[in-house]
Image (cartoon, coloured by chain):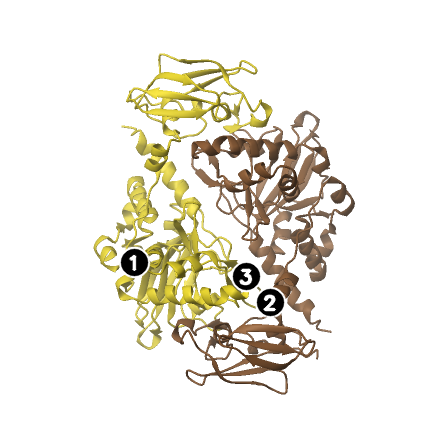
Chain colours: A brown, B yellow
């Protein structure tokens, strides 16, 4: 029952444990029902099954990609025969051309799309306010993250769930932040470069490069895809002030939804304008501050007061927008939502830039220097690395 | 009336011509109406005006970014005085703290958000089928694009409007494609590298690197943000076959909307699964094939048959999805939509990967080698470069 399987039998590289076996099938007009040995049922449409045939004729072994196209079989395709093999595999012979598809029971069960199975697969983020994050802030160690894949996976799961983690003991030499980021993947380049140095600069092209206080914001809301993870590595922090404040935007959005539903609706539906103009660039984006998925869950925050452009809206949306925006920004200022932290040399804070708003107090260079080095890695890369690391965990090699 | 203005007076780097002047204002309860000398009217909400104050106190000259926050003034802010200066500037004194905001008439008129003004700013894409693109395919010359900013702007406007252009006479040395891409900006890196070589490879990790026929598709639909512009530079093409086929996905979507509304609706609302798995990566994305903006216009196509994963949907959406998907894919096969082209050495075809589907026929290496080199640049970078180049055009230096 714990038989690991050869990946060549499957349309992907993930191993699937066989934990349940099919005991019977029932054929309907457009789908079949698999009855499992734990009494669960799964319904699979014939088109879905035909589409997922993983035989070498349908998925080329050259690149493990599908060459079969579903528009080349009849819309009303159905099996002429379905059997359950002794090893639990489902064998389906199709009525149009007698093509045979084999389905691995571990794969099939994992892809059941019943309401219950889909609900079980959903992973909710761990949303925090000041009290929760002060108690549960994920802490990781540089040496372990760099050398041990299990420690790496632990860290990355925290990033996914909490949207924030602190890595301690990071070598304070310039460029180290890239080495940590590369444990996930390549770095997302922007017009500020591959790595950026946060320190006061002459001719600053961003408020980040002044000593000014920055209000809570996400970085690069002016880009269609805001950068995912933001890395901030502290090399030197002898200046006065400059403390970091971090707020879980999902928490603020939740609070708004409960207590200020009209403001929540405005901010999740009315498009703001974002602008970042410089001598050689002029980035703009139009979109709401709160991004919802098709289920209505908040999946992204896009907000930086200092990177906004003039609203370009139907007149009747202007006041509702400002009500929503003022409500959100006022909430971000409440101490009960804010995680307040002073970065020390060797600290690397990593947060989901599309969820966790960040800010810093003004700082004073008379007391000493302040130098952070940062970079971005996108969510796609984070999730890909987690999935690859989990392949090994799923069926331990020992 | 054609007075160019100093950028330091404005919240961005764009110059604004003064083509109309305000002649009167009317103050309402929450907005004021500007009456212009061409009899047009513009309504501006008080909050909107206060939010767009570009004085050095509200927008820091250090980085040209806003430091004022709109939640720091009363929601019912109103002017205590409004005057029109001799030079046409609108001077507003605010009732809460007597702060004074000055508005440049060219800037103000450009940002009018009346229904008419907003409709006028909208730029529709130039949608094509085979007949139109065979007649109007934008052709550009390598030397000009590399050396002349006006030729560069011409090319980039074609990319924005048609979603495709062909650059002829490109130096066939390896890496030249990056030099052309860098005329816009930096290159979007992916797990396939900064530049990718399209030729048949042993141990291909993508169907692109085999000799197989590829059906019409967009690249990297498995990424949250599909790459924007795709560059394909032909260095060698002595192989048999391998012709390129390109289809304007916006045209197919338009056709579907008109002739197959139920299928259009399904494909624009039901999420597909996209997967690209390899030994070291596992990219996934869930989303509809046709992406609409808030007005219902199609702004993106996401589709590659060979990068799909098993649908993970409420059961009642499965058949509607397959009807929609089969409809779209069948339409892409119609010759009347396809631009058919054989790349010659020195050709560089650039297309909007999020709009134009591309495909190639199978090729045969017995007749000779085939080598294309490619890369991606995102839409953000394209649009930024166009805006910067247009600053110069708006007020010619001569």
User: Which residue in the rendered view is the most extreme toward the right?
Assistant: A135
Q: Give the x, y percent position of residue B173.
A: 35, 58
Q: In which quarter of the image is residue A254?
A: top right
| In the image: residue B2, left or right of residue A398 | left
Q: Mark 2 lies on which chain?
A: A
In the rendered view, does B177 fall on the left or right side of A251?
Answer: left
- Estimate how packed mark 1 is, as few (under 14), some (14 to 19) or many (20 or more) residues with alpha carbons within 10 Å: many
* Alpha-carbon span between mark 1 and mark 2: 50 Å
The residue at the far left in this view is B135
Q: In which quarter of the image is the N terminus of chain B?
A: top left
Circle 1 SS class: loop
Q: In this view, does A68 lie to the left or right of B149?
A: right
Q: Nearer the viewer, residue A57 or B316?
A: B316
On screen, residue A120 versus residue B152, left or right, reads right
Q: Which residue does the image show at 41% across and 71% down from the upper left? A: B200
Which chain is disc 1 placed on?
A: B
Looking at this view, is A223 or A331 the one in front?
A: A331
Q: Name the residue under label 1.
A: B347
| Tally of numbered tags | 3
Residue picked out by circle 3: B283
Q: Do labels 1 and 2 share a chain?
A: no
Q: Earlier in the sequence, mark 3 or mark 1?
A: 3
Q: Mark 2 points at which residue?
A: A114
């Amino acid at each position: 029952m714990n038989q690991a399987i050869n990946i060549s039998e499957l349309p992907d590289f993930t191993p699937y444990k066989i934990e349940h076996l099919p005991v019977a099938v029932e054929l309907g007009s457009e789908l079949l029902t698999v009855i499992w040995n734990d009494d669960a049922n799964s319904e699979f449409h014939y088109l879905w099954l035909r589409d997922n045939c993983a035989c070498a004729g349908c998925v080329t072994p050259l690149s493990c990609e599908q060459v079969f196209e579903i528009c080349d079989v009849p819309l009303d395709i159905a099996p002429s025969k379905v059997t359950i093999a002794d090893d639990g595999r489902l064998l389906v012979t199709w009525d149009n051309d007698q093509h045979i598809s084999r389905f691995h029971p571990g794969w099939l069960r994992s892809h059941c799309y019943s309401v219950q199975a889909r609900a079980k697969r959903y992973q909710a983020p761990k949303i925090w306010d000041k009290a929760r994050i002060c108690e549960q802030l994920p802490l990781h160690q540089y040496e372990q993250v760099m050398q041990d894949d299990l420690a790496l996976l632990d860290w990355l799961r925290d990033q996914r769930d909490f949207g924030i983690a602190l890595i301690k003991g990071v070598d304070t030499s310039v460029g180290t932040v890239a080495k940590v980021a590369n444990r996930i993947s390549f770095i997302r380049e922007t017009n500020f470069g591959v790595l950026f140095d946060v320190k006061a600069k002459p001719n600053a092209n961003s408020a980040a490069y002044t000593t000014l206080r920055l209000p809570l914001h996400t970085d690069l809301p002016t880009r269609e895809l805001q950068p995912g993870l933001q890395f901030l590595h502290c090399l030197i922090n002898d200046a006065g002030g400059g403390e970091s404040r971090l707020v879980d935007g999902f928490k603020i959005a939740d609070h708004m939804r409960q207590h200020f539903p009209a403001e929540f609706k405005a901010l999740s539906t009315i498009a703001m304008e974002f602008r970042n103009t410089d001598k050689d660039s002029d980035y703009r984006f139009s979109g709401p501050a709160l991004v919802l998925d098709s289920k209505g869950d908040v999946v992204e925050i896009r907000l930086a007061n200092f990177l906004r452009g003039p609203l370009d809206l139907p007149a009747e949306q202007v006041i509702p927008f400002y009500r929503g925006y003022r409500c959100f920004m006022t909430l971000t200022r409440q101490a009960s939502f804010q995680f307040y932290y002073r970065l020390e040399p060797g600290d690397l804070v990593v947060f989901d830039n599309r969820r966790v708003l960040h800010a810093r107090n003004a700082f004073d260079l008379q007391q000493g220097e302040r130098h952070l080095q940062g970079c971005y890695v996108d969510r796609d890369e984070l999730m890909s690395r987690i999935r690859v690391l989990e392949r090994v965990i799923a069926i331990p090699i020992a």
